[in-house]
Image (cartoon, helix red, strand yellow):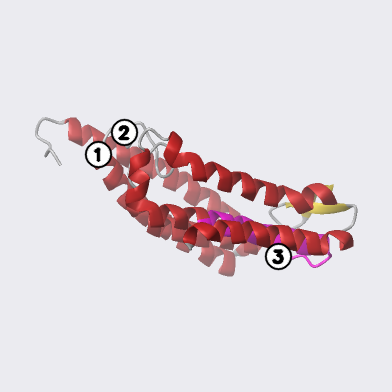
Amino acid sequence: MRKWIPLLIIAAAVVASAVVYPRLPETIPTHWNMDGQPDGWSSRAFGAWITPVILLTMWGFVRVLPAIDPRGANYAKFGDAFEAIIDSLMLFLLGMHILLLRAGLGHPAPMQRVVPFGVGILLIVIGNLLPRARPNWFVGIRTPWTLSSDRVWEKTHRFGGRVFVAGGLLITIAALLWAQWVHVVLIGVVLIAISSVVIYSYLEWKREQSPASPAS
């Protein structure tokens, strides 16, 4: 059943666009600044249909990943987690699509809170799924050191999962309580998360190269 969830998400995006399209103005807001004010507009055709196209393209790409990945056999070892990661990303995009359509109809949401809150929830979900990922070339934390060692991959993904969950919780709290600082928190979390997992994976790889390090 899970492999059908992306198709349901795509269908929901298409139906939402089709239903509201006749009522959309010729131009609709498609970008907002840090204060939640629209500062970018697109034609209603682009605004209404770009997300369904992205979702469909994403779904088509992930369906062929196991066939084109040199380590494609590993996808079967974390199939449920892989599908859940894709589902969560697509649900996030669907949520942003609904918000965009509502804004086009004249019912904007407080984007300065809602978008970071959604990003925080997405990080929490992905952080819980990351430790189940198995070595591959497309999904997960891919550094030269995680791709060179299955042991480093496993340890980095356990560490990265905790970092993502903690960062996601911090962003969601900031979105609810400190909206004026949430973008600073979001950028800080992203920078810390990226740098920490890269450094951690390198240090684990270096430890593995040491003659005194255990074999596993």
Mark in the foreground, 2 or 1: 2
Q: Which secondary structure type mostly characterizes the magenta part of the structure?
A: helix
Q: Earlier in the sequence, mark 1 or mark 3?
A: 3
- The residue drawn where x is 39% and y is 59% is 128
Binning the other alpha carbons within 10 Å of mark 3 as few (below 14), some (14 to 19) or many (20 upward) gives few
Tell us which disc is closer to us: 3 or 2: 2
- Of the image marks 2 and 1, the number of the one nearer the N terminus: 2
Circle number at residue 204: 1
Q: Which residues are magenta?
A: 87-111
Q: Residues within 10 Å of mark 2 (few under 14, many from 20)?
A: many
| Closest to the observer, 183 or 4 | 4
Which residue ends up furthest to the right in the rendered image? 26
Residue 29: % across, % down: 80, 53
- Where is mark 3, residue-wise? 110
Labels 2 and 1 touching (C-beta < 8 A): yes
Q: Identify the disc placed on residue 145.
A: 2
Q: Is residue 33 above or below residue 209?
A: below
Q: Is residue 38 visible?
A: yes
Q: Is residue 132 left or right of residue 23?
A: left
Q: Nearer the viewer, residue 34 or 160?
A: 160
**Where is residue 206 drawn, in percent x and y?**
23, 32
**Quadrant location of residue 9?**
bottom right
Give the numbered dot on residue 6: none
